Amino acid sequence: MLKQRRSAADQVAVGLLEAEAAIDAALNKAAALAAAMPLARTDAGLSALFGQDAVERLTDTIAALTQARRGIVETHKELAEVKVQIGLGAVMIGANGEKPAQVGEARPSLTAVA
């Protein structure tokens, strides 16, 4: 039974981490687009009137992605509770035992690159 629960938990963890990464990647790409659009308009010598609807639509999209991120974070918290309920509270699940730092945990120092 424990082996089956562990296997099921590992499968769910992989899917959860992939979904989290996909949402973060989409949010990152949308933010990069939001930064690029006004610069492109300026570089093209266009009035601020051009593309305003697109900028507004993109900010709506970023808000929706932010809400989706909140949803997946809450899902993660709820699945952590399920993990304890099924007797796997002391077991590291998913990502080969590696887990990103949590709020309040020490994080590695940043290193400058060329």
Image (cartoon, rainbow, N blue to C red):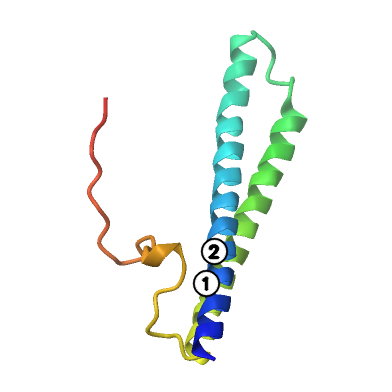
Q: In the visual, does 52 lie left or right of 87?
A: right
Looking at the picture, which amino acid does disc 1 mark? Asp
- SS of the residue under disc 1: helix
Q: Can you tell which mark lies on residue 14?
A: 2
Q: Is residue 97 above or below residue 90?
A: above
- 10 Å crowding of disc 2: few (<14), some (14-19), many (20+): some
The answer to which of 47 and 2 lies nearer the viewer is: 2
Q: Is residue 2 above or below residue 21?
A: below
For the point 68% across and 11% down, the residue is 46
Mark 1 lies on residue: 10
Question: Looking at the rendering, which quadrant does residue 74 occupy?
Answer: bottom right
Label 2 close to label 1 by CB (< 8 Å): yes
Q: Position of residue 26 (x, y in %)?
A: 61, 44
Looking at the picture, which amino acid does disc 2 mark? Val
The answer to which of 19 and 110 lies nearer the viewer is: 19
For the point 39% across and 80% down, the residue is 91
Q: Position of residue 92 (x, y in %)?
A: 39, 75
- 10 Å crowding of disc 1: few (<14), some (14-19), many (20+): some
Q: Position of residue 94 (x, y in %)?
A: 47, 67
Question: Looking at the rendering, which quadrant does residue 112 occupy?
Answer: top left
Q: In the visual, does 70 lie left or right of 90?
A: right
